[in-house]
Amino acid sequence: MSTLEIHDLSISFTKYSKGLRQETTQVIHNLNVSINKGEIVAVVGSSGSGKSLLAHAILGILPGNASVKGRIVYDGQELTEQRKAELRGTEIVIVPQSVKFLDPLMKIGSQVQTSVRKGNAAVAQKKIFEKYKLKPLVEKLFPFQLSGGMARRVLLSMAVVSEANVVIADEPTPGLDADVIKEAEISFRELADNGSAVMLITHDIEFALKTADKIAVFYAGTTVEVAPVSDFSGKGENLRHPYTKALWRALPQNEFIPIKGSQPLANHLPKGCPFAPRCENATLDCLKEMPEEKMLRGGMVRCLYAT
Amino acid sequence: MRMIFSFIGRKVIRLLSLLFAISVITFILISHSPIDPIQAYIGADMMRVGPEQREKIAENWGLDEPPAEQFFRWGSSVLQGDLGTSMIYRRPVTEIIYEKFLHSLALMIIAWLLSGLIGFILGIAAAMKKDKWADRIIKWYCYTLAATPTFWMGLLLLMIFAVWLEWFPIGMGVPAGVLTENVTLADLISHIVLPALTLSIVGVANVALHTRQKLIDVLSSEYILFARARGEKGFTLIWRHGIRNISLPAITLHFAGFSELFGGAVLAEQVFSYPGLGQATVEAGLRGDVPLLLGLVIFSTLFVFAGNLLADLISFLVDPRMKERRPV
Amino acid sequence: MISINKRQKTVVISTITTVILLAILVIGLLISNDRIVTNLDSRNLPPSLSHPFGTDWLGRDMLIRTLKGMSMSIGVGLIAAASSVMIAVSLGIMAATLGRVVDGIISWLVDLFLSVPHLVMLILISFVLGGGMKGVVIGLALTHWPSLTRVIRAEVMQLQCAEYVQTSRRLGKSQWFIAVKHTLPHLVPQFLVGLFLLFPHAILHEAAITFLGMGLSPHQPAIGIILSESMRYLSTGMWWLALFPGLCLLLVVRAFDLLGEVLRSFVDPYRANE
């Protein structure tokens, strides 16, 4: 049994557009993914495609005009909104993208201390700072005074100090240099080894491949493939979905072939397979309806022709 | 420390340039005014004053000199702290301003504190209940207040509390016919309540609307989202990350509102015949007391400047982001 | 469907408001001063059907006086606000386009006008001009532009950096062409919004300075005059002298606020959706 399972998750927003008309946009639809204890799953997709909302939906902190469908199961029990409220910050935590998520007028030390759930907060905070090689001086700093690498460690330490079972990291590596990224890889692996289930939400496929056990490929609001990291090898023969293959081939160390076209926007999705307009193997059938999920060689894929 | 001094230094230099410009402009304007200060001074007795007497008065005040010379004479005595003699009170302008300012200060401090506090609370309440009925009522109330003439609000309070309920006297800072030594604290209080209330009621709108908007912005910020993700909620969340973060801009804004406060005080004092700076300004304007009017313009500029300086200084001292960045 | 109704509601409300405001203005202009007659038989009457706002100590009907005064105040407020907006637009454009020296001078001027309490500045100008209608209008026009100037300056600066303006410039179009084709169309709505923003301040300040005795002369029907006269009769319990005229002023200011908000929501639909 997985620690966290997400079944058929859909998120849509209602907002006013021009002329005070209401408009509903579905940003995530029929998304499935699950994470086991001690496992790192990376949800990989391009920036700005609404991946962060997945994290917010799990924690129950979506804005008021969002509506959520589908089931989220934690530890064998369905996560209701009330249960989410109880668990967030204690058993399920998030590592945010940047220091913008820290209170600008509160000292770092006190902010880390608010994440501590058991025992003496100050002691726990000092211990975690030592572990992440943060000088005691950092306690007294304000968020805007942190460097990129320091900010990364502070944000991670807030997740670790809460001793949660599920850690969701939202874009953990934006604009960081190689050393800091290396450090982040090690930290996440450590977290998983200590028994947490870790979900990395990222656009950085290289980072995901180095860190995660399983990759869930996110395209136009849904997961088109879930594959073990080992499948990302050679020319991508083991991969199941044409998008994943293209993504793999587009990496600089591989063939470095860019994918033609661009991802459809959330409010202009095609009726059938979202990737069909860009897919070389697309047929008329692909345009009819969204392909069902198939289990294939220990992974999942949404493609009519996957083998 | 050095930064604070250079900060204040820059502000003071700016103040001096503005004060100088205001003095020059005011002086030029007044010297071109069609109002004859001598006629204004003598009033109805003008018919009985002969041309010789007129000249004597003019000479006495230096009105026969060319404007530039008059300005230099006035300016150099201002630099020595002498603003001249008021024509209507026949006493030094500085003395009158000092005396009236004490009255106005009491009034303005009470109103400033009350309106700030009430406005802040209303703003927070509105933001927390955004788009609910409480928010709508508070917003409606604030917009209506902002459209209410201050002096009319004063008249309403006067009608209700002084005329109808007879809780407070109708006017005057002190009871008429009572010697200054015999004025009790209770007298003073009973005369200050209504004008202070008028000023507070009208002053609430700005702070409340500003606080509401700021708190709404903060509540939709990423750090509130993260705080919620860590399980913070309810009042703790609002207190720890909301109110702490909006109180600084609210205080700053409230200090920067000294100009409005002064204007409001002029009107409230007129309605309640409260003997403060505002009433003196009106009288100086109505009766053509040029030295007093000049003095009051300069003093009110200083007052507004003090408010702005305090606002800047507080955010400079309290907001860590304003200080030197010191990455480690 | 609800959202469409919301829009219709906005249109209906703003039409009604405009009609009422125009009606006050026109009625006030049409009523000749002869209607404000002294009638010693009906002095100091509280509100009744024949005199909804009551009468004053000379038996004059307060409703007629208020209407007359309101239309006078709206007129003065509009002239003053329009002049102020013109000053703001000219100075704002100058500050944004004529280089750093001009910009520096104009922002210093803005600071200068903001450094004296508004009402004190008005008293000063009115005093210098010898009070009366001229003093009030010029005083109001000269004191309401500073904040709007800042807004317009920022707006024009943003326009100057806009890509299509840059392109136009690189295509060799003249400053004049850019001003007429690109800048002006953006500033027309700004002008209107500015007018509706400044008007409430202008009319309230007009009433205030008249109330203080330094505005319109006591012979003119003005809300400020009516209210300052009412002060003398308040202690005798003639509450209607102050209540209704002030309430009318409040309603007119609120009405303009409302129209301004509607106008802003048309100019800037995104903000209005909040």
Image (spheres, coloured by chain):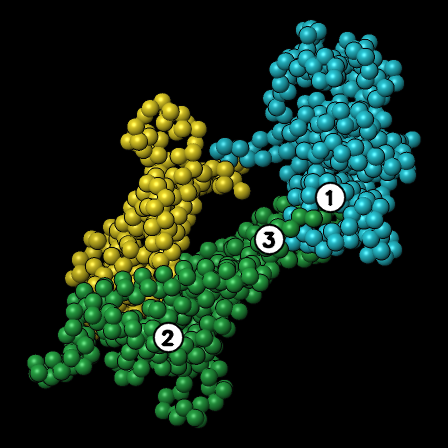
Chain colours: A cyan, B green, C yellow
Q: Nearer the viewer, mark 3 or mark 2?
A: 3
Residue bearing mark 2: B277
Give residue B107's position: percent from left, percent from top: 46, 75
Q: Measure how far apart labels 2 and 1 are at the Cα level.
A: 56 Å
Q: Nearer the viewer, mark 2 or mark 1?
A: 1
Q: Please, is residue A245 above or below residue C50 in the view?
A: above
Of residues A168 and C216, the one nearer the viewer is A168
Of residues A129 and C230, the one nearer the viewer is A129
Q: Are marks 3 and 2 on the same chain?
A: yes
Give residue A17's position: percent from left, percent from top: 53, 33
Which quadrant is the N terminus of chain A positioned in? Answer: top right
Question: Is C18 positioned to the left or the right of A187 in the image?
Answer: left
Residue bearing mark 1: A150
Q: Amino acid at mark 3?
A: Glu
Q: Measure how far apart labels 1 and 3 are at the Cα level.
A: 19 Å
Residue bearing mark 3: B324
Q: Chain of mark 3?
A: B
Helix, strand or loop for disc 3: loop
Give residue B40's position: percent from left, percent from top: 19, 76
Q: Chain of mark 1?
A: A
Location of residue A88 (image quadrant): top right
Q: Amino acid at mark 1?
A: Met
Q: Residue visible at 74% across and 14% down? A: A254
Give residue B327's position: percent from left, percent from top: 66, 48
